[in-house]
Image (cartoon, rainbow, N blue to C red):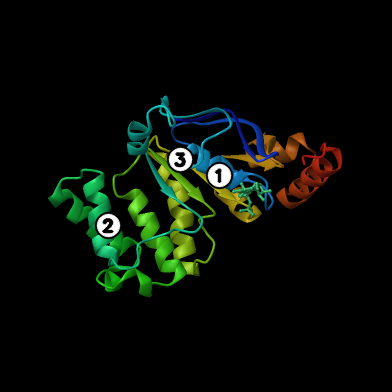
């Protein structure tokens, strides 16, 4: 459903992403785990068509994101780490606008918007301008927008940052359940507990390279680690010591 083929991105002379290949299958949630600056956001931006890769390809349901951008964009919902939402619209206006872009028929759109506003506890604020929303409310609105057209692929960058416990639980449940109906979920995080609790497989990225890929249990077994924290610290420290200098 999601396929990255030798994806690489160079900023000036610096390779933020060196060679990343992975797949997320229908029915699967994959956590892209890595320390700060590992290349997670760069990979995600290349996957959603925001950042042109220097090498490699990103495919969604077999559609090349950079060759057929409009077709590809119908297939996924994306929640960035810092959602930029136009502040002079209300939450309801923004969702209606997004529903129009996705060409969802009006009646269906209204029902879906209502359902999402309730689910994300935003009904009370639906008519307030987004510029009055807190960070968490913007994050939830951004999620609602990503889910409007019930896309087969959901892509999220650091989805838990800034959420209160209610919203965090909601997002955790969503990450777990969304992929169940043959859909694929990919999210980036540096939070170990999230990758451990809410991912079928984990891809550990560091310095723009894939260090390990597998179920949390497989990774611990393969690397003789007792827990994910120890695994994470050991692998990222080893890679630090081994890595050639990337100017
Ligand atoms: N526009 C840019 N120009 C130059 N370097 C950049 C740019 N964007 C990112 N980088 C560098 O690329 C590397 C990867 O950044 P990226 O944002 O992909 O990491 P990340 O894994 O998402 O990190 P974090 O968890 O801190 O968000 C970092 O070293 C970063 O400084």
Identify the mark at residue 222; answer none if there is no mark.
Answer: none
For disc 3, the marked residue is 48
State which tag comes first along the sequence, 3 or 1: 3
Residue shown at 34% from the left, 56% from the top: 144
Along the line of sight, the residue nearer the viewer: 220 or 240: 240
* Horizontal side of residue 41 vs 246, given as left or right: left
Tell me the element at label 1.
loop
| Residue 24 is at least partly visible in this image | yes
Residue 124, picture quadrant: bottom left
For disc 2, the marked residue is 95
* Quadrant for the N terminus in the image: top left
Q: Horizontal and vertical percent for residue 161? A: 54, 62
* Quadrant for the C terminus in the image: top right
Q: Horizontal and vertical percent for residue 60? A: 43, 31
For disc 1, the marked residue is 199
* Horizontal side of residue 15 vs 129, given as left or right: right
Label 2 CA crowd tier, 10 Å (few <14, some 14–19, many 20+):
many
Whether residues under marks 2 and 1 lie with C-beta atoms below 8 angstroms apart, the answer is no
Q: In this view, does 175 lie above or below 69?
A: below
Q: In this view, does 178 lie above or below 61?
A: below
């Amino acid at each position: 459903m999601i396929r990255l083929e030798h994806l690489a991105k160079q900023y000036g002379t610096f390779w933020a992403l060196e060679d990343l290949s992975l797949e997320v299958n229908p029915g699967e949630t994959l956590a892209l785990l890595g320390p700060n600056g590992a290349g997670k956001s760069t990979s995600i931006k290349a996957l959603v068509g925001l950042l042109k890769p220097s090498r490699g390809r990103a495919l969604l349901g077999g559609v090349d994101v950079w060759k057929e951008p409009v077709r590809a964009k119908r297939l996924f919902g994306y929640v960035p780490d810092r959602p930029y939402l136009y502040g002079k619209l209300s939450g309801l206006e923004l969702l209606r606008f997004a529903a129009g872009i996705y060409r969802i028929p009006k009646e269906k759109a209204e029902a879906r918007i209502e359902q999402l506003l309730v689910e994300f506890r935003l009904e009370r604020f639906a008519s307030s301008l987004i510029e009055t929303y807190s960070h968490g409310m913007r994050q939830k609105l951004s999620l609602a927008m990503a889910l409007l057209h019930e896309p087969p692929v959901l892509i999220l960058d650091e989805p838990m940052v800034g959420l209160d416990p209610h919203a965090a639980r909601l997002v955790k449940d969503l990450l777990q359940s969304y992929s169940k109906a043959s859909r694929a979920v990919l999210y980036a995080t540096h939070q170990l507990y999230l990758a451990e609790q809410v991912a079928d497989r984990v891809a550990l990225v560091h310095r723009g390279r894939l260090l390990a890929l597998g179920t949390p249990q497989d990774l611990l077994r393969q690397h003789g680690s007792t827990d994910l924290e120890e695994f994470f610290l050991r692998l990222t420290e080893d890679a630090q010591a081994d890595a050639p200098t990337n100017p």
